[in-house]
Amino acid sequence: MAYIALEVDPALWFLLSPRRRRHRFTVEVPGTDTVGHVVRMVGIPPTEIGAVRLDGRVVDLGTRPTAASGADGDVPGPVLALGPRQRPQPTRQSPPRFLLDVHLRSLTRRLRLLGLDAAWEADAEDAHLVHRAAREERVLLTRDRGLLHRGALTEGALVRGERADGQLDDVLDRFDPPLAPWTRCLRCGAPLEEAGSEDVAEQLLPRTRQAYRAFSRCTGCGRAYWRGAHAGPLDAVVTRALAARRPPA
Ligand SMILES: [Zn+2]
């Protein structure tokens, strides 16, 4: 076996076991491992890694470090420094498109409310999610680290926060996507189009039909929307998201 010293940026310490949350620690690795293997071995999903430096030189996750052999700490081995993903994070598709795992339904709804393309499926296997994300060039959002360790994954992000509001803050801060509130269907995510009250009449109670003038309809599932249907908590989500926008660079 051989040894390699790791210096992990404190922003990533929450992903490490408590005993490794310090400036530098040494790990034992088989001599043939890539940087990506070492990163996975200490529990950090590759999606969360930004700059990688080996003895000060920028390398990628496929690089094979020459680890030092000998007893732990005896030999000055290579030093692998890991930084966090830059924010805002560039994505293949701009604006970014997302695919969320089954546990992030509330976050999906919030992203759609803000006009973002957010796909979600009730019963999707992990392999299916990874495959779909790659095929449709979507960023896979999950709280499940194991999902992000899958080799076939092209773009993903570990969502931070226990509750949907905190998760939304994290995703908006990480990707800084353009927002267009009230332009997508909350149920299926398709864009909305303007509609007259007669177009959506069968979905409206007579009172609603009389009280509102501006209606829209989902181009995917046909559901009718009108301002006022979303009052209260959803308005608060929009107001909060718009207020937290990054100032233009
Ligand atoms: Zn719809």
Image (cartoon, rainbow, N blue to C red):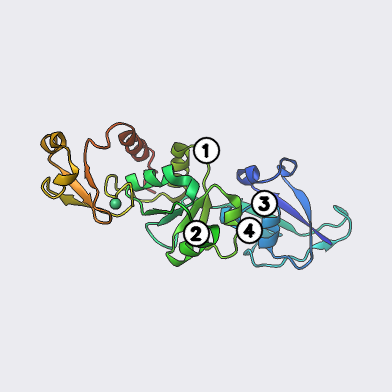
First of labels 4, 3 by sequence position: 3
Density class for disc 2 (Cα within 10 Å; few <14, some 14-19, many ≥20) is: many
First of labels 1, 2 by sequence position: 2
Q: Are marks 4 and 2 in contact (CB under 8 Å)?
A: no
Mark 1 or mark 2: which is in front? 2
Q: Are marks 4 and 3 in contact (CB under 8 Å)?
A: no
Residue in the picture at 13% in, 38% down: 209
Residue 246 lies in quadrant: top left
Mark 4 or mark 2: which is in front? 2
Residue named by callout 1? 162
Spatial separation of the CA atoms under disc 3 and disc 1: 20 Å
Camera sees residue 247 = no
Residue 169 lies in quadrant: top left
The amino acid pointed to by label 1 is Glu
Residue 129 disc label? 2
Q: Is residue 110 above or below residue 94?
A: above
First of labels 3, 1 by sequence position: 3
Spatial separation of the CA atoms under disc 2 and disc 3: 21 Å
The amino acid pointed to by label 3 is Gly
The amino acid pointed to by label 4 is Val
Nearest to the observer: residue 193 or residue 68 = 193
Residue named by callout 4? 52
* Residue 104: % across, % down: 47, 46
* Residue 7: % across, % down: 70, 50
Residue named by callout 3? 43
Specify the quadrant that holds the N terminus.
bottom right
Q: What is the secondary structure assignment of the residue under circle 1?
A: loop
